[in-house]
Amino acid sequence: MRREPSLDELGAFLKARRAQLRPAEAGLRDGAAPRRVPGLRREEVARLAVISTDYYTRLEQGRVQASEAVLDALAHVLRLGGDQREYLLTLAGKTAPPTAGRSARQEVQPQMRHLLDDLTLTAGFVIGHNTDLLAWNAMAAALVMDFGRVPERERNYVRLVFTEPAIRVLYRDWEAMARLAVSHLRMDSRRNPHDPRLTALVEELSALDPQFRLWWTSHDVAVRAGGTRLLRHRVAGDLALERSTFMCAEDPGQQLVVWTADPGSQSYEALRCLASTIETAPEGLHGAA
């Protein structure tokens, strides 16, 4: 079953990507005359996609729907990657979202909680809809922060990235990681862009932080994938950890995110030392969501 298109969001996404693409990247020669707008002009996108400028203009204004053939042409012209193309098609109502959107917080799956508790040298988190932080283990709390002191309604990964000073200090490359987190939230939003909890979160962070507001309106999207996390921990020192993501079979809207270090590396030995300082937590302390 396909979802209804979100034409306003589709138009905003096209406009944002057009503004970010330099003429040379699209194979165009940039003339000597100054441009009134950054990036490509509407008529340039339309010409390259072999559609009329009027039709493309109405697409950006959210007034018409587009066929998959037109969307494919626009994805090629705008140099969209796989994640961005999937996002474009979802906004146009051409693909079904992975899961139905929900306005209420999820309950973490029991097996995911058990798996978290079994991880001793690995920081683990369960991320749900809209990047809600559903559960974490003792190592995650020791490495990042005491998530239990955050009220449940505010326990959201992107929110914490922008509002918690401890996390800003922890990431050695905070700006890059914060921007990536926003792109994950934007990708998650395709499931239900009108979710009232998502709307409230975006409004709150847009008012609090101009960088979030800028990155959200840029419409960058990305799925959670592997990569290196560079941290500067107050006890363990500088760490380079690999991030991996696993989807929950029982609820694909929940993902287990783990940070690991290569055995024998300096980061691995630092994690072993940090783990030795962790006291056994009472049952239910970590991730009571």
Image (cartoon, rainbow, N blue to C red):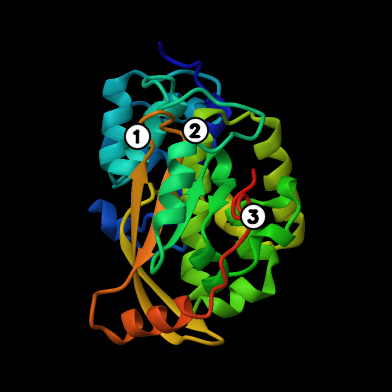
Label placed on residue 86: 1
Up/down of 93 relative to 204, above or below: above
Q: Quadrant of residue 259?
A: bottom left
Name the secondary structure under disc 1: helix
Relative to residue 125, is residue 248 drawn left or right? left
Amino acid type for the residue under numbered disc 3:
Leu
User: Residue at point 51% right, 25% down?
Assistant: 58
Q: Residues within 10 Å of mark 1 (few under 14, many from 20)?
A: many
**Which of the pair 164/1 is nearer the observer?**
164
Q: Earlier in the sequence, mark 3 or mark 2?
A: 2
Name the secondary structure under disc 3: loop
Mark 1 or mark 3, whichever is nearer to me: 3
Q: Which residue is mark 2?
A: 190
Q: Which residue is mark 3?
A: 285
Relative to residue 235, is residue 149 drawn left or right? right
Q: Quadrant of the C terminus?
A: top right
Spatial CA span between label 3 and label 2: 32 Å
Do the residues bearing badges 2 and 1 touch, measured as CB atoms within 8 Å?
yes
Do the residues bearing badges 1 and 3 touch, measured as CB atoms within 8 Å?
no
User: Residue at point 60% right, 58% down?
Assistant: 214
Mark 3 or mark 2, whichever is nearer to me: 3
User: Residue at point 57% right, 72% down?
Assistant: 279
Spatial CA span between label 2 and label 1: 10 Å
Q: Quadrant of the N terminus?
A: top left
Relative to residue 33, is residue 77 drawn left or right? left
Q: Position of residue 220 (x, y in %)?
A: 45, 50
User: Residue at point 38% right, 79% down?
Assistant: 272
**Which of the pair 228/50 is nearer the observer?**
228
Amino acid type for the residue under numbered disc 1:
Glu
Q: Residues within 10 Å of mark 3 (few under 14, many from 20)?
A: some
Amino acid type for the residue under numbered disc 2:
Arg
